[in-house]
Image (cartoon, helix red, strand yellow):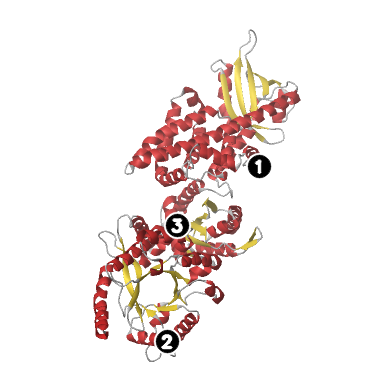
Amino acid sequence: MLADPSELDRTASHMMPADAEIQLRLQFLEVTAEDVRLLREVHPLLQPRLPEVIAGFYRHLQTIPVLRGLLKDPVVLDRLYQLQAAYFQTLTAGDYGIDYVRHRLRVGLAHQRIGLAPEWYIGAYRKYLGDLGPVLQELLQDRPGLFLPTYSALMKVGSFDMGLALDTYIKAGRQQLRDSEARFRGAFGQAAVGLAQLSADGRWLRVNRKLQDIVGYTEEELRGMHVADLVTPEDWQIDAPLLRALAHGELETSSREKRYLCKDGRRVWVKATVTAMQPDAGDAALVAVIEDISQRKQFEEELMHLARHDALTGLANRTLLLDRVSQAIAQARRSGNQVAMLFLDLDRFKTINDSLGHDAGDRVVIEVGRRLKQAVRDADTVARFGGDEFVVLLPELPTEDIAAALAQKILSALFEPMLIHGHELAPACSIGISLYPRDGDNGKTLLKNADAALYQAKAMGRGNYQFYSEEMNARTLDRLTLESGLRHAVERGELELKYQPQIDLADGAMLGAEALLRWRPAGQQLVMPDAFITIAEETGLIVPIGEWVLRTACAQQVAWRQSGLPDLRIAVNLSARQFRQPGLDAMVARVLAETGCPADRLELEITESVLMERPDSAAQTLQRLSDMGVQLAIDDFGTGYSSLSYLKRFPINALKIDRSFVRDIAAKSAASNDDGAIAAAVIALAHSMGLTVVAEGVETEQQRDFLRQLHCDQAQGFYFSEPMSAAALAHRFVPQRARECGEQAQGM
């Protein structure tokens, strides 16, 4: 049975440094955001190499006689090996906040209670960091400039950890000293461990008060008993030959950890050290020192629990899950059944953290873990992988229908509202499912494929579950390839802009052009925005890419003007993430100043759905841009929901009618169909507010004529021109300028 962690929690809480002190320590060690980023980047690369580093570490321990003696028990060695592996895996994970410090203090306390001396901490870190240097250098050989910064970051975190470990020893040692003094005064000189004298054949001759307390027998009762009466038959098979060797002088001392059978039926862990004494006359006698180590064993179990369970929820962690997956697969291989792995995460969990705080987020995670435990079978395992990610392992499934039914049960359970800090929340989730043996024959493969299925579930609208298929891996690989290429597209000069003219419907003159982004990877075909803009949004790459688009378009407007072309207005789309980015107005002002583009020649287009997400803050951002002289347009108008009261507050200059309302306008029925009516209403609304109206997607003469009848101001679309290069658009102006010059000459 696991130890109650409350005592560890209380002690760790007393030792817990204030957040300011944590930050001060990290600051003193010069742990920067760049250090954290470097460690997180190298973390997944390092994991496959950790076993060899840790194995080398234990080979080093075996060269020290004292440590070799301590580690001669293979069970203890294996247990420490697993704990050490799990411990070191978190060093480069990149999260060194309050939870990390609390966890480290608990681990340090557990080690301190077990009795490990602090010098082994120092030696362990020295060996680990020393062996890791060449590994890091090898992993980063293609990026040699990152080796020293990454190794320095690891040294900083190692020093931070070592300081926390020494804190527990110093502070716990002081407390234990005070406790020991109190016990000494209370015991009036009685021994703090059990002491006994035994006959050569193992009969109890004399015992002290402490030993009576440990086993619950009186001294008189013990004198009528044998050592074998206090141990299990299994332990006696080991103890009997040791006792004979001590009695015959073949062994001086024997020390073993085992469980004594108490009078009340309990089993208590003790460390029994027996030493042979040869008196001047008479039979040999044995002296036993019996130490109650039950609390130490509890802390060992607690330490093992910490290494294999999530600290926040108490659920299994990745290490324990993969161990149970291996067991489940072995059993399924014998029985012919299946094993299912459900990978799930909460939809839009970041919104909860951002709006209500991380404490509320933690409470949501705890409640989700509780509901998952209630939803599954007793034989199933629920694990948390950190953040809002959970995995459910289902062993011994006769059919995959059971996995589907449980997935639906989980979706329903999490959809039920929960009250967190006075707010009613319903954090729906998405689930990906993989099956053994169809989708993999080991835990890591099943986990990877369940993750791919989870991504597919999110792509299909969230709040659903999907089974893994081979096509998902291909799509995931394509996405990763696309994302990797996109990260270098700007620096490699692979992005380009096309420009679609915007035409005055009254006289056919070109008034401006909309800049449209294209990506042409080296040696590959042109990639259209719908294939990569979503990825750019999700990864945050849209911010630097968006600035590149704005700078390039503004520079092109200046280049056209300097070459003698009319002073065109250049239109640039702002994505949702760009618009919400702090300092947008400062970035626009900087680009205008650096390129020399007049502010009134730049038009920024924002969709109405983005504006209405946070209309108050959107109005402030738009006003700052408008005050600079930048023209503002609402793009795709009519496809979202706009409040007219907010629309009046926005300092906009134009509305762009979405192409969906233009596409189905036909010459004969345009005035009567719904799309025509909507277009007419939008134009009338815009004109009543003094706004210019631009129609997108005009592809036919009938559409142009109908829009003219409605007095639409401007239009763009394939009827006038497809998007073209800057040079092609400049050539388009030549005949137009020639006509204008001819008309001016005739007028003279």
Q: Position of residue 685 (x, y in %)?
A: 49, 81
Quadrant in the picture for residue 56: top left
Is residue 693 rendered to the left or right of residue 13?
A: left
Q: Is residue 369 above or below residue 164?
A: below
Q: Earlier in the sequence, mark 3 or mark 1?
A: 1
**Alpha carbon of mark 3 to alpha carbon of mark 2: how far?**
52 Å
Give the SS element for disc 1.
helix
Q: Nearer the viewer, residue 400 or 484?
A: 484
Residue type, label 3: Asp
Q: Nearer the viewer, residue 215 or 159?
A: 159
Q: Nearer the viewer, residue 80 or 134?
A: 134
Residue 710 is tagged as 2
Disc 3: which residue = 451
Q: Nearer the viewer, residue 747 or 495?
A: 747
Q: Is residue 469 above or below residue 55?
A: below
Q: Are marks 2 and 1 in contact (CB under 8 Å)?
A: no
Disc 1: which residue = 6
